[in-house]
Image (cartoon, rainbow, N blue to C red):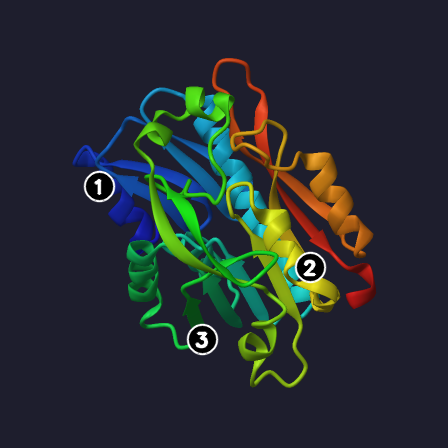
Amino acid sequence: MPTLLRRGLNLLRTLNVRVQDLEPGTALVSRNHGYEVVPLGRGSWVVRRGKPDVQRTHKAVMNHLAAEHVASLLYHYRADCVLDVGANTGQYAKQLRRYGYRGRIVSFEPVPEITEKLRRASANDPDWHVYPYALGREDRTDTINVVYGSMSSMLGPSEFGTTRYKRFKRSRGQEIEVRRLDGLLDKVLDGLDDPRPYLKLDTQGFDLEAYAGGGDRVREFVGLQSEVALMQIYEGMPRMAEAVATFEADGFEITGMYPVTREETTGRVLEFDCVMARADAM
């Protein structure tokens, strides 16, 4: 005999509501019929609307796999503080919470108007802290190029970047504060009995500069992730080989690589999200 849930779903179908069974006890209910469900396994799916878009679906799948991988790594390495460098409006921190991380989050975002949005996003999370700084090799006041969205950078755009992203033509300069990571780390980790920090870098081409400001204390991190570039969107940004070699020299090893952006016409990957860990920290 059909269960009460099944009878209810069958009734919805008679009302022209789309009901798609995903697994026992789970169904997707929608008035919109123009979508497709792509199973990812382990109780996860991508729902895409409109015409099939392989690029967009691939990006959604990679984002899910990267987030799930990071959540697992944080758990297994017992990370209790994630430094979110280049936080923008808090997208990464919110994703950490959605995927189950409950430890401390410390976000760094130097552009004042974006910092205020970040503070509002973190207001109801007592273990999510916000600092209005960029990180770099030295403490100083500098100018950042503010670009719409999440592409503000200490570096100017390359010729390739300007061609690909028209928004660079509308950038403006903003004076900000830059701080060294090692000078902030004691304050950031204060109150943790046995700190096991994890470093996330997404600074639009400035990751190695932010990392250099950690000095010898980068070896205190159990893991890190950084957007490493195959194509230079910004002038002077390091390429993937240089970035990975720098991290490996300090004992970090790759645990995952996930495409972040691609060229739609050629399919070339522009950047990977590189996730790394220190095996001796396990």
Q: Earlier in the sequence, mark 3 or mark 1?
A: 1
Residue type indicated by callout 2: Gly
Q: Quadrant of residue 10?
A: top left
| Disc 3 and disc 2 in contact, CB within 8 angstroms | no
Above or below residue 61? Residue 198 is below
The residue carrying mark 2 is: 223
Camera-side residue of 90 and 44 = 90
Residue to which mark 1 is pinned: 12
Which residue is at 46% across, 48% downward? 24
Secondary structure beneath label 3 = loop
Q: Taking 143 as reference, is 39 above or below it? A: above
Quarter where residue 281 is shown: bottom right
State how far apart marks 3 and 1 are (Cα): 42 Å
Residue appearing at x 32%, y 58% in the figure? 112
Residue type indicated by callout 3: Asp
Q: Quadrant where the C terminus lies?
A: bottom right
Q: Quick one: 110 or 42, which is closer to the camera?
A: 110
Q: Residue furthest left?
A: 15
